[in-house]
Image: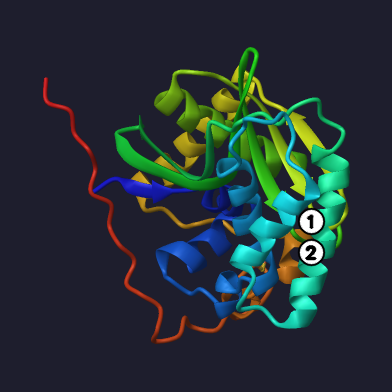
Amino acid sequence: MPYPLSATKLQDYHRCPKSYYFKYERGLKTKAFFVSPALGKALHAALAKIYWDWHYLDPLPKMTWINQCWESVSSLLSSELQASGAEILNTYYCQFIAPLISLRKPLAVEGKIQATLNLCNVDFKITGRYDRLDWLEDGLELIDYKSTKTMPAFDPDEIDLQIGLYYLALEQKYHQSLKQMSLLYVQLGEEIVFEATPEHKQQVEATIGELAVQLRTDSEWQPNPGKQCTKCTYTRYCPAVTDPPDPLPDRAKEQSHLQLSLELD
Ligand code: SF4
């Protein structure tokens, strides 16, 4: 069975191998990881519809098309959320659609990424999601919509890993290079564009290689104390910050032992 990997998992591993171990190897996840606000979900659905269902016979849709898409996905929301979603999409339209000469049909919307990789004799299955994939003249642009009201401070290493993983996966599927990853903050009307290069792919392969060695040798997962500890939910189990650490709770799953992939000569 290939070892499942995603950009989030790889970023977690890079941030702290010990917390990665608690979360993924021992299954100590908190409910907070799965919370998804209804407004954010509806906005993502509306944006997918706006781009995917547009007939592309006219160069640009009017605001009525945006409202129509929003109404079709927001009927279960409260009237307050419906109104704020409509306002957010109005800002989005003014910022990202109205200034264009024509709307470009995406290659895909709300897509899944899947790829495989074998490093250090470990099979990895890479999975992920994206909101929109556009063709550029010389490659691909991956677009993610963000519905938060504030823009986070980006950790350059974590962004690089995310770009590298997308680069690797999209190259396998489309035989095209990722040229840029864009984060569109729909509430703020802001866009941040990150350039993607083959070096991102090399960097991600190096990190996955480290993870492969860790998984193969079953050695101690090292804590990486730092500012990330202030938000960590595993401090009580972590020997780097709690002496002595609490034993893991009964709900912790048994550590799985990796089945290595072996090539036959
Ligand atoms: S407390 Fe800090 S060092 Fe320990 S697992 Fe959490 S992030 Fe890692």
For residue 2, what is the image quadrant? Answer: top left
- Please state, as top left, top right, bottom left or bottom right, where the C terminus lies in the image: top left
* Element at label 2: helix
Q: Is mark 2 within 8 Å of ligand 1?
A: no
**Numbered badge on residue 162:** none
* Element at label 1: helix
Q: Is residue 199 visible?
A: yes
Give the distance between the C-alpha atoms of the residues marked 1 and 2, in whole angstroms: 5 Å
**Label 2: which residue?**
86
Q: Position of residue 243 (x, y in %)?
A: 64, 79
Seen in the picture, residue 101 relative to 219 is either above or below; the reply is above
Q: Is residue 37 visible?
A: no
Disc 2 marks which amino acid?
Ala
* In this picture, residue 195 sits left or right of residue 111: right
Q: Position of residue 79 (x, y in %)?
A: 75, 81
* In this picture, residue 26 sits left or right of residue 36: left
Query: Label 2 near label 1: C-beta < 8 Å?
Result: yes
Disc 1 marks which amino acid?
Leu
**Label 1: which residue?**
89
